[in-house]
């Protein structure tokens, strides 16, 4: 598998914010979002890095691609300390869906998939092994095109798991695209939790005004049952 890094840290986003996880950051992505904060993950490099002790930041280099057995060994070694789950992240981890399906049963922890929600066919390959799905809905204002059809197929598949939806809010977030995203969630199941994430300062993407976040949250609460506004807390704490 093409990896960027493996390490133990604190989940900084979404419904499981604050949980200790082993992160498996995989290389490759099918999108190029304006606010991407992991641009180095979008393409595979010759080497990745693996933490030797959980949270020790004592990384050693490994050559890409990495066999699933070897990667599982590194992850399971970090899991010798208690963790909530293993975050499969990226990049977009479903770009390596076949390889993930080989890796997943070798991992000793619960599996938490962080995904942009645009690859439903690939999700179907991996989903039998996944416990929790953190699914983004990508709005056209920041992802460059519409993904409504893919997102709806994806969420209908993921609805059989513990799933929540994340929508990043920027100054460019439009009322119409936002309402369409919430309509999509409500059409699948209005009980699915929705996390609204004000964008962190990156790539000169302008942040959402506080009053606009309140207005969008109020609109979302009219459409689905569980809406929370949570920024990226790992950046506040200086965590990876
Ligand atoms: S989906 Fe994630 S990794 Fe890919 S470009 Fe968008 S923010 Fe970056």
Image (spheres, rainbow, N blue to C red):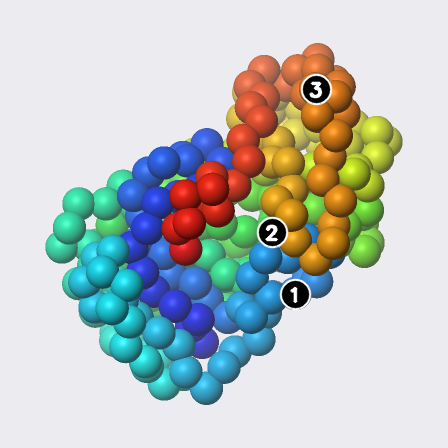
Q: Above or below — where is 44 with respect to 74? A: below
- The tag earlier along the polypeptide, 2 or 1, is 1
Between 144 and 157, the residue placed more toward the observer is: 144
- The tag earlier along the polypeptide, 3 or 1, is 1
Residue at disc 2, CB closer than 8 Å to ligand 1: yes
Q: Secondary structure at mark 2?
A: loop
Which residue is disc 1 drawn over? 30
Q: Secondary structure at mark 1?
A: loop
For label 3, the crowd category at 10 Å Cα-Cα, with few meaning under 14, some 14 to 19 and many 20 or more, is few
- Taking the spot 64% from the left edge, 19% from the top edge, the residue there is 224
Which residue is disc 2 drawn over? 116
| Residues under numbered marks 3 and 1 in contact, where contact means CB atoms less than 8 Å apart | no
Between 122 and 44, the residue placed more toward the observer is: 44
Quarter of the picture containing the C terminus is bottom left
Q: How far separated are the C-alphas under marks 3 and 2? A: 24 Å
Q: Pinpoint residue 102: horizontal percent, then vertical percent.
A: 35, 67
Q: Is residue 107 left or right of residue 29?
A: left
Q: Is residue 180 left or right of residue 59?
A: right
For label 1, the crowd category at 10 Å Cα-Cα, with few meaning under 14, some 14 to 19 and many 20 or more, is some
Q: Pinpoint residue 51: horizontal percent, then vertical percent.
A: 27, 67
Does residue 128 appear anywhere in the picture?
no
Q: How far separated are the C-alphas under marks 3 and 1? A: 31 Å
Which residue is disc 3 drawn over? 214
- Taking the spot 86% from the left edge, 31% from the top edge, the residue there is 176
Tell us which disc is closer to us: 3 or 1. Answer: 3
| Residues under numbered marks 3 and 2 in contact, where contact means CB atoms less than 8 Å apart | no
- Taking the spot 58% from the left edge, 27% from the top edge, the residue there is 229
| Residues under numbered marks 2 and 1 in contact, where contact means CB atoms less than 8 Å apart | yes
Residue 2 is drawn in which quadrant?
bottom left
Tell us which disc is closer to us: 3 or 2. Answer: 3
Residue 34 is drawn in which quadrant?
bottom right
- Taking the spot 22% from the left edge, 60% from the top edge, the residue there is 56
């Amino acid at each position: 598998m093409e990896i960027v890094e493996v390490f133990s840290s604190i989940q900084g986003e979404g419904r499981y914010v604050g949980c200790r996880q082993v992160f498996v950051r995989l290389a490759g992505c099918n999108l190029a979002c304006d606010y991407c904060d992991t641009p180095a993950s979008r393409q595979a490099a010759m080497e990745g890095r693996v933490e030797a002790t959980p949270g020790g930041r004592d990384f050693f280099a490994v050559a890409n691609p990495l066999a699933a057995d070897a990667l599982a060994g590194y992850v399971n070694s970090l899991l010798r300390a208690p963790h909530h789950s293993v975050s499969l992240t990226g990049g977009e981890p479903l770009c390596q869906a076949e390889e993930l399906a080989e890796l997943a049963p070798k991992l000793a922890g619960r599996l938490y998939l962080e995904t942009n929600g645009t690859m439903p066919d690939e999700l179907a390959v991996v989903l039998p092994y996944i416990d929790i799905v953190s699914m983004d809905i990508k709005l056209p204002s920041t992802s460059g095109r519409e993904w409504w059809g893919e997102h709806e197929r994806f969420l209908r598949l993921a609805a059989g798991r513990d799933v929540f939806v994340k929508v990043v809010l920027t100054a460019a977030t439009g009322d119409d695209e936002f309402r369409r995203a919430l309509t999509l969630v409500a059409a699948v199941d209005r009980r699915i939790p929705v996390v609204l994430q004000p964008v962190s300062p990156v790539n000169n993407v302008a942040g959402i005004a506080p009053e606009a976040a309140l207005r969008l949250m109020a609109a979302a609460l009219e459409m689905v049952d569980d809406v929370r506004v949570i920024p990226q807390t790992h950046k506040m704490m200086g965590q990876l």
